[in-house]
Amino acid sequence: MHYSRNDEQNKVNYIKKHIKLLFTALILISVLNSYAQTPQKTRILFVLDASQSMLGQWSGEQKMKVASRLLSNLMDSLKGVDNIEVALRVYGHQFSVAAGNRSCEDTKLEVPFAANNYEKVKHTLKYLYPKGTTPIAYSLEQTKNDFPPCGNCRNIIILITDGIEECDGDPCAVARALQKNGVTLKPFVIGMGLDLEIIDAFRCIGTFYDTKDKESFENVLKIVISQAMNNTTVQVNLLDVSGIPSETDVNMTFYDSFSKSIQYNFIHTINYRGNPDTIPLDPVLTYDLFVHTLPPVSKKDIKINPGKHNIIALDAPQGLLQLKMSGLNEYDDLKCIVRQKGKMKTLYIQDFEEVTKYIIGDYDLEILTLPRMYVSDVNIRQSHTTKVFIPEPGIGIFTLPGTGIASIFVESNNKLEWIYNFSKKTTRETIVLQPGNYRIVYRSLNAKNVIDTKEKKFTIKSGASSQVKITW
C-alpha cells in the first residue's frame, strides 16, 4: 500500500496534537492535586492591650509583664507547628491619655504576618510599655488590613485586654462587620481580671474568656490556641418520628450565628456503615444549622466542643407526595403549588408524576389545571407515599369566526368563573380542560355593539375531544 508524504505529515501532526493535549491535561491534574493537598493555613493575629491600666498588679505582678511573658512562651511552643503564622497588633502604647484624639487612634501592627516570625514577636513584647487609653473598636477595625490576601487561610483574632472601650467606638459592630465581610472568624477575647459589670460588653465581640489570675490566663491561652488550630468532627442526625437518624439526602447549611454568614454547605449522607456521615467543622464558631427540607428545619446557637465528636440532632421526619392523573395526562408541563396547611406562602412547585419529600403534616395543593383544582388537608406520613389523583382532562378545539375578544368560563351551581382568555390574534385554539360544563363568550374586534356578543355552552369529558365553533 502506498502512503503519500501528506499522509505521513498528517500522522505526525495528529500525534503532536494529542501529545500536547495529554501534556496539558497532566499539568492541570498536577496543579489541581497540588491545590487539593495544600493544607489550610491558620493565621492568628494577637491584639494586645498596652493601655495605662496594664501597669496594674495582677497576682503580685504587673499585668503587662504577665501578658508579655506568657505570649512569649506561647511563641516558643508554636515554632514547630506547621501551617500557622502569627502577627501582633498593639494599642495604647504610643501616646499618653493626655494626647486626646491621638490616643484614640493609638494602634499599630507591630509584627506583620510572616513565616517563623516568633522571635520578632518576642522581641517586641519585651519592650512594650503601657501609656494610653483603650481604643478597642478602632484597633479591631484596623485589623482588616492586617491579613494579606490568601485563598486558603483561616483568619483568627485573639484580643487580650484588661479594660473596656474608652473611645466611644462599638467593638461589637466592628467584630460583626469583620466576620460578615469574610475577613476573620469569630474573635476570641481574653479578659484579664475584668470587673463583673463590664464583662457582658465583651460577649458580643466573640468567644469570651474571663481570667482571674496568671495561672488561669495561661490555661485559657492554651485552650484558645487549641481551638484556633484544630477542626473537630460533627455528625448531624436527622431524626424520623421514632427518633432514628434515618432521614438523609438533603442539603444543609451552617451559618455563623454571630455574623449570619455562610460557613459550610453539605448534602447530608448516610455512610457505608449506615450512620450519618461525619463532617469536619471549625470549633471556633457558634453555628446556626438550616436543613433544606420542605419546609426547612433549623437549630440555632450550636456550640462545638473542640477535640470531641459532636452530635447535632434535629427532628426531620419526612414522607412522600406523588401527583397522578387518572388516565392520560394531556398537559405539556402540569405543575402544582404546595403550601403548608393554612398558609398562603408557596412552599414548593411540584411537577406532576414527580415524587417529592415533605416534613410530615398537612398540606394544601393548588393544581395548575384549567380550571385550577384545589385539594386541602393532604396528609404526609412518615416514610409513606401519599398519592393524589385528579381526573383525566379532555380537549377543547375552538374555532372563531374572526379575531376578537374571547374568554372561557366554567359553569357550576349557576355561577360563571373565568378561567382563560384567547389571543386576539388567533381564530383557532386547542386547549386542555378538566371535565365540566363551560361557556365561551366572544365578540369580534370589528363589532362595536354589545349585542354582537356571542356565547356557546359546551361540555368537556375525560379523554374526549370537543369541537366548539362560534358562528355569526
Image (cartoon, helix red, strand yellow):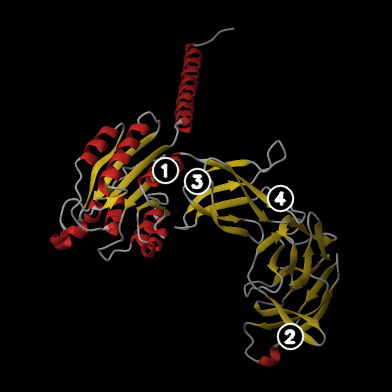
Q: Name the amino acid, label 3.
A: Pro
Pinpoint residue 196: horizontal percent, then vertical percent.
39, 62
Q: CA distance from mark 2 to mark 3?
A: 74 Å
Q: Dot 4, crowdedness within 10 Å: few (<14), some or many (≥20)? A: many
Q: Nearer the viewer, residue 193 or 368?
A: 193
Q: CA distance from mark 2 to mark 1?
A: 90 Å
Q: Name the amino acid, label 2.
A: Lys
Q: Quadrant of residue 409?
A: bottom right
Q: Between disc 2 and disc 3, whose residue precedes? A: 3
Q: Name the amino acid, label 1.
A: Asn
Q: Which residue is mark 4?
A: 247
- Relative vertical location of residue 443 with respect to residue 236 in this rendering, above or below: below
Q: Which residue is mark 2?
A: 454
Q: Which residue is mark 1?
A: 219
Q: Are marks 3 and 4 in contact (CB under 8 Å)?
A: no
Q: Which mark is residue 283?
A: 3
SS at badge 4: loop
Pinpoint residue 237: horizontal percent, then vertical percent.
66, 49
Q: Between disc 3 and disc 1, whose residue precedes? A: 1
- Relative vertical location of residue 263 with respect to residue 3 in this rendering, above or below: below
